[in-house]
């Protein structure tokens, strides 16, 4: 076994060197490294190291009611097969589907390998728009066995500067966006390659708040996972219709006491399972591996917990 570990370390070191020298693509590195180390979270940490991003985030703590198993840490999920990685990573495509009025909506669809039906997950963009980072997240969900659809809420526009992103956010009708997310779920759940009658919703930044709003307003949500999104007001939290797992950092702008209260209300008044994770010293957008805000250790923990949450509640 020790010999195998040494071989794996050598293989990973060679892969890192090849990636840094540009001999293999990010997709090729990800696929091969996952097979070597058995964890996409660890691979993301390696990618961050290649990009000279400091790995300095302390382990997260959890805030949750005692009966939900506070302080427990889900075990890392099994690595996807080579075939799943090959077919899912970077293999998504833009698709169209109708909104409530029959008009055309678009989104990025990524499907897992294999012929059998799989659970559906809606991936909601940050305020930048449907960019390569969000598409990459959809690909990662597909590699883990989910059918992932990222709706294009900005209708083709993508921001690269904060002022531009702020303008796009201000122009977005949030409740109309929630309705479009519901239509994205309706579209997926109607496909023969999707299993179950409810979909998961995960969102980041602006998308985190929209994921929470979808959990309040849509009966199609089977589980929601907001990352550093605008919190629900207490009366909204009491109307949540699906299990919620939330991920926030202590170096962000959010009121963590209000966050804890939101989770408690979801549990006690809405009657839905709720988990709230707080990541020490993690800033806003700590999951975004294209940004200086990225914190690999916190991101890896949050990713494994998200997969476990969806697998538990979506079947």
Image (tube, helix red, strand yellow):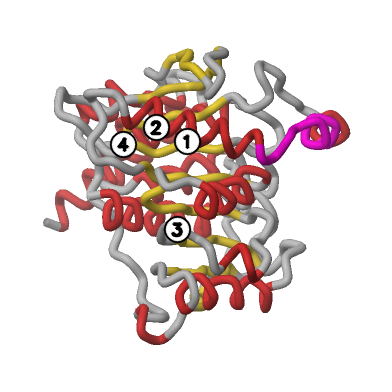
Q: Nearer the viewer, residue 28 or 218?
A: 218
Circle 3 — which element? loop
Question: Residue 136's x, y, as percent?
Answer: 48, 30
Task: Tell which circle, 3 or 2, labels the residue nearer the N-terminal end.
Answer: 2
- Residue at label 1? 137
| Left or right, 226 with reference to 169 | left
Image vertical order of residue 144 relative to residue 180, above or below? below
Circle 2 — which element? strand
Q: Residue at x 70, y 40 (%)?
A: 174
Residue range highlighted in magenta = 166-175
Task: Tell which circle, 1 or 4, labels the residue nearer the N-terminal end.
Answer: 1
Residue at mark 1 to residue at mark 4: CA–CA distance: 11 Å
- Residue at label 2? 148
Residue at mark 3 to residue at mark 1: CA–CA distance: 25 Å
Image vertical order of residue 282 relative to residue 150, above or below? below
- Residue at label 3? 241
Task: Tell which circle, 2 or 1, labels the residue nearer the N-terminal end.
Answer: 1
**The N terminus lies in which quarter of the figure?**
bottom left
- Tell which tag, 2 or 1, sits nearer the viewer: 2
Question: Residue 100's x, y, as percent?
Answer: 53, 24
- Residue at label 4? 146
| Label at residue 37 | none
Task: Examine the structure image and report whether residue 92 is included in the region drawn in magenta.
Answer: no
Q: Nearer the viewer, residue 22 or 180?
A: 180
Identity of the residue furthest to the left in this view: 1
Instruction: Kindly check if marks 2 and 4 are in contact, taking CB atoms under 8 A apart as contact.
Output: yes
Examine the rendering and report whether any part of residue 11 can be seen: no
Instruction: Kindly check if marks 2 and 1 are in contact, taking CB atoms under 8 A apart as contact.
Output: yes
| Left or right, 270 with reference to 74 | right
């Amino acid at each position: 076994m020790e010999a195998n570990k040494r071989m794996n370390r050598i293989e990973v070191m060679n892969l890192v060197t090849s990636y840094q020298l540009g001999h293999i693509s990010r997709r090729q590195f990800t696929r091969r490294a996952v097979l070597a180390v058995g964890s996409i979270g660890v691979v993301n940490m390696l990618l961050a190291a290649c990009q000279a991003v400091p790995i300095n985030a302390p382990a997260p703590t959890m805030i949750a009611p005692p009966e939900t198993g506070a302080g427990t840490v889900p075990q890392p999920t099994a690595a996807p097969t080579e075939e799943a990685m090959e077919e899912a990573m970077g293999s998504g495509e833009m698709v169209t589907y109708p909104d409530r009025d029959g008009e055309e909506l678009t989104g990025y669809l990524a499907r897992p390998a294999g012929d059998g039906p799989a659970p559906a997950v809606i991936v909601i963009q940050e305020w930048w728009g449907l960019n390569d980072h969000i598409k990459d997240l959809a690909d990662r969900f597909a590699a883990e066995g989910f059918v992932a659809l990222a709706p294009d809420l900005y209708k083709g526009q993508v921001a690269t500067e904060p002022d531009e992103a702020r303008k796009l956010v201000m122009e977005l009708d949030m409740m109309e966006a929630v309705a479009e997310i519901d239509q994205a779920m309706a579209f997926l759940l109607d496909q023969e390659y999707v299993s179950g009658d409810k979909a998961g919703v995960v969102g980041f930044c602006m998308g985190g708040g929209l994921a929470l709003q979808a959990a309040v307003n849509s009966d199609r949500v089977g589980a929601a996972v907001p990352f550093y999104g605008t919190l629900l007001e207490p009366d909204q939290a009491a109307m949540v219709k699906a299990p919620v797992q939330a991920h926030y950092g202590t170096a962000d702008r959010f009121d963590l006491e209000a966050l804890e209260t939101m989770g408690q209300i979801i549990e006690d008044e809405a009657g839905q399972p709720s988990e709230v994770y707080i990541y020490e010293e993690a800033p806003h957008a700590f999951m975004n591996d294209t940004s200086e805000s990225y914190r690999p250790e916190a991101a890896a923990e949050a990713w494994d917990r998200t997969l476990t949450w969806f697998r538990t509640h979506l079947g």
